[in-house]
Structures are given as structure tokens and as C-alpha cells.
Image (cartoon, rainbow, N blue to C red):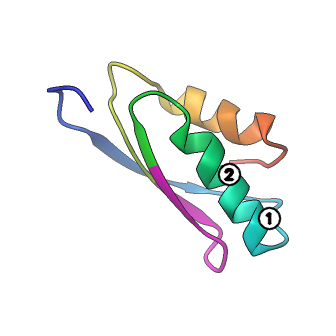
Amino acid sequence: MSGIPPETIELSISGMTCAACAARIEKVLNRVEGVEATVNFATEKAHVRYTAGVVSVDALINAVRKAGYDA
């Protein structure tokens, strides 16, 4: 990440039916520049660290939606 301190957000994820779904969402989020994400299937949450000047919360939500889930 750049010299800007990262922001942290927790997204509620819907539509996951298995651990593979969580892994897919995590992979999609981690492909976004300036993002480090972990997804927990049991809690249906994504814990995301991101660089605010590089990526927006809307971009994170859109990435989840493009993967076929909702945030």
C-alpha cells in the first residue's frame, strides 16, 4: 500500500452458500489495487483494509456484486 494510512471497513456479504464462495469474494477483493481483504463465511463479513485515495467503498461493493454476491 502507499504512504497513506489504510482505512478499514467491514462489509456484510449476502449470497454466500459455502466456503468456496467466501474464497472467491476474497480473491476478487484482493485483486483491487490498494486492498487487503479477508472474508469469513461463518459471520458473512468481509474485513477490508484499503487505501482511500486509491479505491472507494463503492468500488469494493461493486467488486463483490460483479462476483455475483451482495454487500
Magenta residues: mostly which secondary structure? strand
The amino acid type found where label 2 is placed reads Ile
- Is mark 2 in CB contact (under 8 Å) with mark 1? yes
Which residues fall within the magenta stretch? 37-47
**Residue under the image location 61 percent in, 76 percent down:** 43
**Residue under the image location 77 percent in, 66 percent down:** 20
Give the labeled residue for mark 2. Answer: 25
**Residue under the image location 85 percent in, 44 percent down:** 68
In the rendering, at what x and y percent does residue 49 appear? 37, 46
Q: Residues within 10 Å of mark 1 (few under 14, many from 20)?
A: some
**Residue under the image location 66 percent in, 73 percent down:** 41
Displayed quadrant of residue 64: top right
Closer to viewer: mark 2 or mark 1: 2
Q: Is residue 18 left or right of residue 2?
A: right
In the rendering, at what x and y percent does residue 65 appear? 76, 38
Give the labeled residue for mark 1. Answer: 16
In the rendering, at what x and y percent does residue 47 appear? 46, 58
Q: Dot 2 lies on which element? A: helix
Quadrant occupied by the N terminus = top left
